[in-house]
Amino acid sequence: MSARTINGGPPSTATLSVRALHKSFGSIEVLKGIDLHLQRSEMVFVLGPSGSGKSTMLRCCNLLEEPDSGAILIEGDKLTGPGVNLNKMRQRIGMVFQSFNLYPHLTALGNVMLALRRVLKMSRDQAEAVAMTALDDVGLSNRAGHYPSQLSGGQQQRVAIARALALKPTVMLFDEPTSALDPELVGDVLDVMRDVKEKGMTMLVVSHEMKFARDAADRVVFMDGGVIVEQGPPEQIFGAPTQDRTRAFLSRFNG
Amino acid sequence: MGVFLDQFLNQTVLAKYTPLILKGAGVTVILSIMIVLAGIALGALLACLRAYRIKPLSFLIVVFADVMRALPPLVLILLVYFGLPNLGVVLSSFTVLFLVLSLVLAAFAEEIVWAGITSTPKGQWEAARSTGLGFTQTLGFVVLPQAVRMVIPPLTNRAIAITKMTALGMVIGVPDILGQATTAQSFSANASPLTLAAVAYIVIFLPLVIASRWLEQRFTQKGH
């Protein structure tokens, strides 16, 4: 059985589809044809050694990196190609970054409100209400008036999640969301991610949080050298990986 | 001592020319405000245009900024004031001084604001664009506010340095502080009006220098 056939279902019904994605930086081919399809409410974890292309793949999903070829589709709508309103499409794709990237000159509330006001054109009152709800969802409504510099790393990342969620995206991308955090702050962010999943969000996560992947992911994808080596339910990937490269990678974490 | 007082602090001369110097101070203040507003606005606008990285446009902006920063302002003032009438464009000395110093400040402000824009982390652009904000919106709501905060201290210093150059207007007859003072000095054959002028400059610019020091401390402490 090839890895591709267990991609959940045909692409047309997928919430997020990555098709035949290629990307090179100069002469180095980072992505050598990635096919990945996420069903509604599915949480897919992408694992792999550094340089495997997993972050580049994620960043191609909202065109922060421009693919050389291939296609990205959100509920069947193409992200690439002529006549696509990229800003409109990006509202449907939330992204959370390793380094949070909160706007330092705005409060937590201001961070969440900005796109609501300027992209969704909400009134100030409406945007504030939506933003407060989003901050409440990540347990930080009591920090709404704080600037990022007054928040811990974990709190900043939760504000960043609220900022993305407030736009009611179809899919959420997480690019190593806990890698920049002190160990004791990781748990709060993972709890929020679990909440987000339980509310039915479709999530594509690049992360090294193996335990969380095992507990929470619906599917785990192992990437190496710009290709998907193996994928399947977490118990299969962690318990009985079929590929040598997967085994070698996982043994470094478990050993 | 008596000679000194008579030359620099002559009571009669001081009393006679104080109203004139005050009038000149009004001109200096108005000119300075206009130059700061126009210069910084134009400079910020040029820095923003440069952010779009349209090659020919960026090239023109860089040429403008470099030429304006390389030329001594006095040369520019004389060139415009005595040169343009030959082309049939006659501008008042006030207008020439305003135009030249605004352009010089704009050139410096462009470079300073541009440095602020380029030192805003890439992640700020990415975060904003990922929420659906366009390039111009990201520039206006996310990058520029941070860039301006970063560059307020150098911008303030440069603005003070350029507005002080309004004194150069004397050579083309602008009735600013120094213009009035030199006129008064030649009428009275006494240096006291120049003393008054120095006092007037200190009264106007010392608070600004102190304010810039305060701004500098405030924005470095915050450390965003």
Image (spheres, coloured by chain):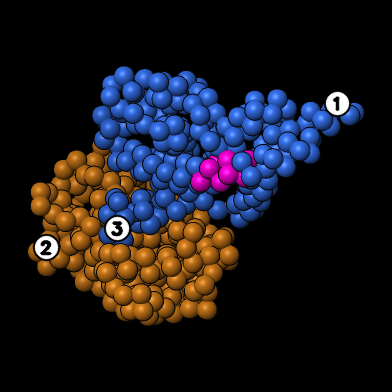
Q: Name the residue under label 2.
A: A76
Judge depth for marks 2 and 3 and give the one in front.
Answer: 3
- Residue A231 falls inside the magenta stretch: no
Q: Name the residue under label 1.
A: B3
Residue plotted at (64% across, 45% down):
B19
Residue plotted at (48% across, 78% down):
A141
Residue plotted at (31% across, 61% down):
B131
* Distance CA(mark 1)–CA(mark 2): 93 Å
Name the chain under label 2: A
Q: Mark 3 points at which residue?
A: B133
- The residue segment tinted magenta is B21-30
* Distance CA(mark 2)–CA(mark 3): 23 Å
Residue plotted at (37% across, 28% down):
B64
In contact (CB < 8 Å): disc 2 and disc 3: no
Packing grade of label 3 (10 A; few <14, some 14-19, many >=20) is: many
Task: Quarter of the image for the N terminus of chain B: give it.
Answer: top right
What is the quadrant of residue B197 in the picture?
Answer: top right
Chain letter for the orange colouring in the rendering: A
Give the answer, above or below, for where B35 lies relative to A125: above
Q: Chain B is drawn in which colour?
A: blue
The secondary structure type at the circle numbered 2 is loop
**Residue A89, x across and y down, in percent:** 20, 60
- Residue B22 falls inside the magenta stretch: yes
Same-chain check, marks 1 and 2: no
Q: Quick one: B136 or A186, which is closer to the camera?
A: B136
**Residue B33, x across and y down, in percent:** 50, 46
Q: Quick one: B79 or B214, which is closer to the camera?
A: B79
Query: What kind of residue is marked 2?
Result: Gly
User: Which numbered tag is attached to residue B26?
Assistant: none
Give the main secondary structure of the magenta stretch.
helix
Query: What kind of residue is marked 1?
Result: Val
Can residue B145 be seen at all in this image of the molecule? yes
